[in-house]
Amino acid sequence: MSEAKSALPGARFDGIASVEEAGLNGMITLRGDLDDTALAKALREVTGCALPGPREVVMAGDKGAAWMSPDELLVMVPHGEAEAAVAALDAALGESHALAVNVSDARAVFDVRGSHAREVLGKLMPVDFSAAAFGPGQIRRSRMAQVPAAVWMTGEDAFRVVCFRSVAQYVFDLLKTAASEGGEVGLYA
């Protein structure tokens, strides 16, 4: 079997913000009734995290979950643990009406950091990235130019972007252009 590789290994750009491909990440789509106590218990067993609320991300070390829609979570684990995590979720969910699927290799992940990171993302997505509207632990699913993407804050002036692997180069190029020197607009200053 071939060795897993991220979409754009080592891709990095430094401008008014840094943009870096984040490497391999374990990601599981978990669909089901988010009010089901079995689902919440299964999530806690696999990640150590409570169920996130709407538009929220919860993390416990390198594991966590993001609310993606009223019946969907993105479960995050180290890449090498994704298959075992799916099996553990399936076992813990038992007869509950739910679905867990490893989507790790179908996604690309980028980190955008720096004092102008909000501006970089604000140029590309119809999201209010002001500090009053968007803070650490919050997530949005939207469009990044012509493609779907999810973005959340991992810390002050630090964001994580997830997109489909098939559009990784396009998204990286968008982020590079928006982060180019001289591109400051001062909207979130």
Image (cartoon, rainbow, N blue to C red):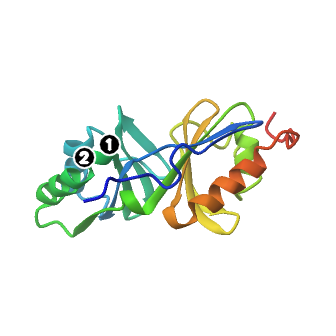
Relative to 63, 149 lies left or right: right
Callout 1: SS: loop
189, 145: nearer the viewer: 145
Q: Quadrant of residue 180?
A: top right
Q: Disc 2 residue type?
A: Glu
Relative to 111, 75 lies left or right: left
Residue bearing the label numbered 2: 81
Q: Disc 1 residue type?
A: Pro
At 38% from the left and 62% from the top, the residue drawn is 72
Label 2, residues with CA under 10 Å away: few <14, some 14-19, many ≥20 = few
Callout 2: SS: helix
At 76% from the left and 44% from the top, the residue drawn is 179
| Residue 178 pos. (x, y %) | 77, 49
The C terminus is located in which quarter?
A: top right
**Badges 1 and 2: C-beta atoms under 8 Å apart?**
yes
The N terminus is located in which quarter?
A: bottom left
Q: Is residue 177 above or below residue 50?
A: below
Q: Note whether residue 69 is visible.
A: no
Q: Quadrant of residue 64?
A: top left
- What numbered label is drawn on residue 70? none
Mark-to-mark CA distance, 1 and 2: 5 Å
At 88% from the left and 40% from the top, the residue drawn is 182
Relative to 112, 40 lies left or right: left
At 37% from the left and 57% from the top, the residue drawn is 104
Q: Note whether residue 91 is visible.
A: yes
55, 100: nearer the viewer: 100
| Residue 31 pos. (x, y %) | 32, 65
Residue bearing the label numbered 1: 78
108, 131: nearer the viewer: 108
53, 129: nearer the viewer: 129
